[in-house]
Amino acid sequence: MSYALVTGAAKGIGYAIAIELAKLKKSLFLVDIDEPCLSEAADYIRNKHFVEVQTIVQDLSDPHAASLLFEKTKLYHPFLRIIVNNAGYGLNTPFLTTPVEEQLNIIDVNVKAQLRIAHLFIPVLQKFPKSYLLNVGSTTCYQSVPYLSVYAASKAFVISFTRSLRFELKNSTVSVSCLIPGATDTAFVSRAGMQPHTLKTAEKFNMSPQEVAKIAVKGLLKGKAEIVPGFTNKLNATIIKFIPKSLVERVAANIYKPR
């Protein structure tokens, strides 16, 4: 028996990753702030895949969240093999008109929670012959994104942090990977407050959470450093390195600027 812990697991990519892990007969700890959706997700996975599923309702913006997760899962640490740091969100708003507390909350969830969870749980993972850590980023990590500025900056942290951590742990038993999805058909867009013109652009490139999750789990278990799902996302991640940053920023601003 082995366990995986997945944050942001009530819906979207996190939920889809949990299902893929359940297909591999991994028992699960599902973490999310949305108790009704989390309970529904857990029930579905139990009934469909016949694996042990435990839920933890937790706001990851709480600075004590990682410690609470650590304590609540302590009895199962001898069986814990996979950590998926998926929880995250953004706001599609001008920086100066958005309360600073809301901007800092994004950093608390997208950056600080990932860091704290990694710092606490990696020593647990290191005790076993093979274990895995997956941090979930975004293709926005490769560029500045006006009107989605703090989210994009947080994801730039995630990819840099993950690659550095991977190097530090290269001689350990822990494989560290970063999932870098592009536009995905999830509730992210509604929470971010994206407007119709932005959604229309995203819909042209949307992948389903299920597609992303299949690629994510396959890449994780293969030990890939960066997992970029979909041909279009891979292409964009490559060519953006050769395009002037000012041009990329103008294009992004045209897509994300509220109207």
Image (cartoon, grey):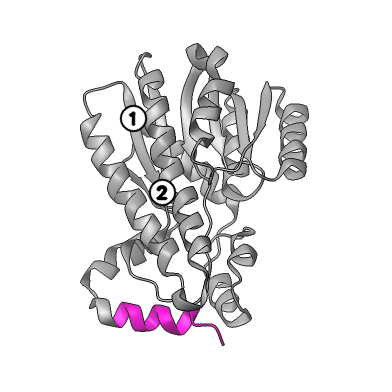
Residue at the (54%, 71%) spot, across then down:
202
User: Viewed as shown, does residue 172 lie left or right of 104?
Assistant: left
Q: Residue 59 carries which label?
A: none
Q: In this view, does 91 lie above or below 84?
A: below
The front one of 47 and 75 is 75
Most extreme residue toward the bottom is: 259
Any part of residue 220 in sight? no
Amino acid type indicated by mark 2: Val
The front one of 193 and 210 is 193
- Which type of secondary structure does the marked residue at label 2 adopt? helix
Task: Residue 93: give x, y in percent of width and height.
Answer: 52, 75
Task: Residue 115: give x, y in percent of width and height.
Answer: 38, 40
Confirm whether the magenta stretch covers residue 256.
Answer: yes
The residue mark sitting in front, 1 or 2, is 2
Q: Can you tell which quarter of the image residue 27 is in?
A: top right
Characterize the local packing of mark 2: few (<14), some (14-19) or many (20 or more) Cα atoms within 10 angstroms: many
Residue at the (58%, 44%) spot, across then down:
8
Residue at the (49%, 49%) spot, across then down:
109
Q: Residue 111 carries which label?
A: 2
Q: Can you tell which quarter of the image residue 244 is in?
A: bottom left
Amino acid type indicated by mark 1: Ser
- Which type of secondary structure does the marked residue at label 1 adopt? strand
Residue extent of the magenta highlight: 247-259
User: Between marks 1 and 2, how big is the CA–CA gap?
Assistant: 20 Å
Q: Quadrant of the C terminus?
A: bottom right
Q: How many labels does the image show?
A: 2
Q: Which of marks 1 and 2 is nearer the N terminus?
A: 2
Confirm whether the magenta stretch covers residue 55.
Answer: no
State if disc 2 and disc 1 touch (CB < 8 Å).
no
Task: Residue 48: give x, y in percent of width and height.
Answer: 75, 31
Q: Residue 175 carries which label?
A: 1
Q: Can you tell which quarter of the image residue 114 is in?
A: top left
